[in-house]
Amino acid sequence: MNSQITLPVNELPKNWYNILPDLPEPLPPPKEPETGPSRMEFLSRTMIKECLRQEMANERWIPIPEEIRELYVHMGRPRPLYRAKRLERRLGLKRVRLYYKREDLSPTGSHKTNTAVAQAYYAMKEGKTTLTTETGAGQWGTALAYAARLLDLECVIFWVKSVYDWKIDRRTLMKLLGAKVYASPSQQTEIGREVFSKNPEHPGSLGIAISEGLEYAETHRDSVYCLGSVLNHVLMHQSIIGLETIKQFEIVDEKPDLIVGCLGGGSNFGGIALPFIGEVLQGKRECEFLAAQSLAAPNLVKGEYRYDFCDVAEHTPLLKIYTLGHKIEMPPIKADGLRYHAAAPIISLLRHHNIVKAVAYPTDERAIFEAARLFLQSEGWLPAPESSYAIRAGVDEALKAEKVGVEKVICMNISGHGFLDIAAYKEKLGIN
């Protein structure tokens, strides 16, 4: 069997998968806080109307507009699934088979383009001229800048300051795509100025950056806010990953026993896992699901399942989520895309029902970057730090199964590449 498993373009899914009708219980609805203005009304003013409609859609299958399918093909979908034969040999695996999905092959280097082009398309159809957003690791900001440029829209990005300061090349790429990029907390918004005034050295967080993106959209004409993770419509757009992967496993007559992905808010994990979870819930297959996290933000491991805000400034409605608390201070890590206080409502409910399991790794990230080096030296691809959490967890699970003599098929989602994270590899692995 060849190591690369591909789908022809004519096999690109025509619909996104919406798991809401298949969940083991109805998703708890958003709630308004007891005080202050209506957050639901605020979102209706600042977000894309079609995306808000999709947020609570009851249909299992949501048609992908032909224009978005064309954009998917333009940016290289369908993406290949690989059998990790070299990594298997390196680990001495005899009973365990490892696979990985290559979302790093997008033009910007991550899975984030799957929802970025969809949101940009719907914003354009609604007559918006500017997209605003936040970004942590920088992958989402780059993806939205890319999508905005393809559709002749402007893009304003608030980037977590601790990452903005060291990812100079990714910042350059966003600007090459025409985006305006601000370190968050910034001087562009009231919430940014408030946080900055209390601590000019604040490293920032996704919660703060989300608040800034929402406020900017509210105060600037023809601007609309786009979110790169957490919300239902984002996970639905990302389901293209898992839908392709199901077809690719059918080609090689395999069935994964375990799906592994890194998880901050939940977009790439949900993207690959939810179509498989849907089939589990429908009684069509058996499979387990593991989210790999950092102890900097172990929302599924140490969080509480309760209603909380999704941003620091409390612009959003209250969602029922696994949360560490929206005001929590989290230490900076190189895989900053995982440093978010809460998991997506859908993932949280599945965790509550023990359908999704989670593991969290130490904040020094040594084990993570060692897994990335192992992957690079065996498979030949340099993964993003976030993706390396999935690799670490996948390798750990493979070695456990091999040790006890269990045959197992494990699939890891490689959510992005690490070409613009070289400084992190140099620092963490002590390379001169």
Image: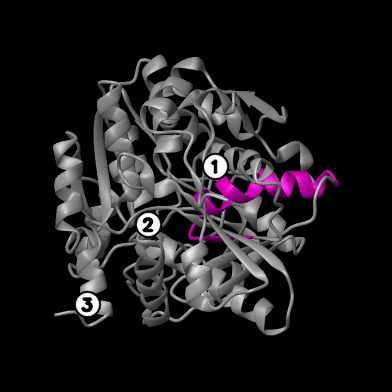
Tell which circle, 3 or 2, labels the residue nearer the N-terminal end: 2
Name, please, the residue furthest toward the front.
Answer: 1
Name, please, the residue furthest toward the right.
Answer: 283
Name the mark nearer the viewer: 1 or 2.
Answer: 1
Crowding at label 1, few (<14), some or many (≥20) Cα neighbours within 10 Å?
Answer: many
In x, y percent, where is residue 382?
33, 61
Tell which circle, 1 or 2, labels the residue nearer the N-terminal end: 2
Judging from the image, what secondary structure is the residue with disc 3 in?
helix
| Relative height, residue 82 to residue 113 (above, below) | below
Residue at 21% from the left image edge and 62% from the top image edge: 196
Q: What residue is pinned by disc 3?
A: 427
- The magenta-colored residue range is 259-283
Crowding at label 2, few (<14), some or many (≥20) Cα neighbours within 10 Å?
Answer: many
Residue at 34% from the left image edge and 72% from the top image edge: 333
**Residue 23 in view in this figure:** no
Q: What residue is pinned by disc 2?
A: 206
Q: Is residue 336 left or right of residue 252?
A: left
In x, y percent, where is residue 134?
33, 47
| Relative height, residue 237 to residue 3 (above, below) | above
